[in-house]
Image: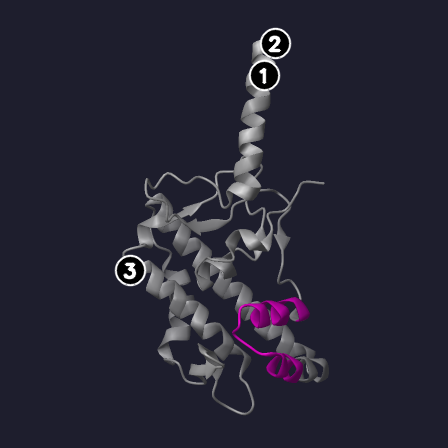
Amino acid sequence: MPRVPSPEASSREELSIKFVNTVAWRLRDLVEDRIATSDSILKWLVDAELADRRIAAQLRARWKASPHEADAFLNAAHGLREALYRIFIARIGGGRIDRTALADINRYLDAALGGVALGPVGDTLRWLPTAGKVAPETLLKPIAWSAVSLLTGPRALRVKQCQDERGCGWLFVDESRTQNRRWCSMGDCGNLAKSRRHYRRSQAAEE
């Protein structure tokens, strides 16, 4: 079975990029969705520090009693993720921006940051819900704001897509000095690409 790029490969990426990369092997016929269930999206939100374990437990209990609420949130999260992907890909390829995708993102901006605010956690600052009863959609707002900050800033043209020939499809921000990075991670797709090139050169030399 093909090896899937590890989560660590994008651990330093922008929040919005990490969210888009919850789909692995985007350019293959069979993709891997890492937030395909309500439990997996809650775990991702906790790992991304957009929710703590108390909030996750609260939502898990609510969704157990109201599965349709869990399904609605999961659909909203997937919709935002795919809208972000379409816009990032358009910027990478110089294509036309999908206005439907823009509208999907702007829904999270229209209500500003109601329900979520910057707050202290120990000696760090994080996005924190401001209401006692969490509206799940508020947890997605920082992701949309992350994308807006990236897309309207000087790093917008540094967003690229992994060129791994197996179809990885992950996005990344190229912070290299020469701006010639091709893979999501040298430890994953980059090393495999180098190994394949070496193997092909060895085979050609033997012929």
Above or below, comparing residue 55 to residue 101 in the picture? below
Query: Mark 1 — residue?
Result: 202
Q: Cβ–Cβ below 8 Å for labels 2 and 1?
A: yes
Three-letter code, disc 1: Ser
Q: Nearer the viewer, residue 26 or 53?
A: 53
Secondary structure state at the residue bearing disc 1: helix
- For image coordinates 59% across by 16% down, the residue present is 202
Q: Residues within 10 Å of mark 1 (few under 14, many from 20)?
A: few
Above or below, comparing residue 178 to residue 53 in the picture? above
Left or right? Give the position of 50 relative to 57: left
Residue 105's spot in the image, x, y percent? 41, 67
- For image coordinates 38% across by 70% down, the residue present is 106
Three-letter code, disc 3: Gly
Magenta portion: prevailing SS class: helix
Q: Tell me, for residue 89, which label it has, or none.
A: none
Residue 10's spot in the image, x, y percent? 51, 54
Query: Mark 3 — residue?
Result: 153
Which mark sits nearer the N-terminus, 2 or 3? Answer: 3
Q: Is residue 41 magenta?
A: yes
- For image coordinates 57% across by 42% down, the residue present is 188
- For image coordinates 53% across by 84% down, the residue present is 135
- Distance from Cα at disc 2 to Cα at disc 3: 50 Å
Instruction: Write down the region rendered in magenta.
Output: 39-59
Three-letter code, disc 2: Glu
- Front disc: 2 or 3: 2
Query: Mark 2 — residue?
Result: 206
Residue 65's spot in the image, x, y percent? 72, 84
- Distance from Cα at disc 1 to Cα at disc 3: 44 Å
Which mark sits nearer the N-terminus, 1 or 3? Answer: 3
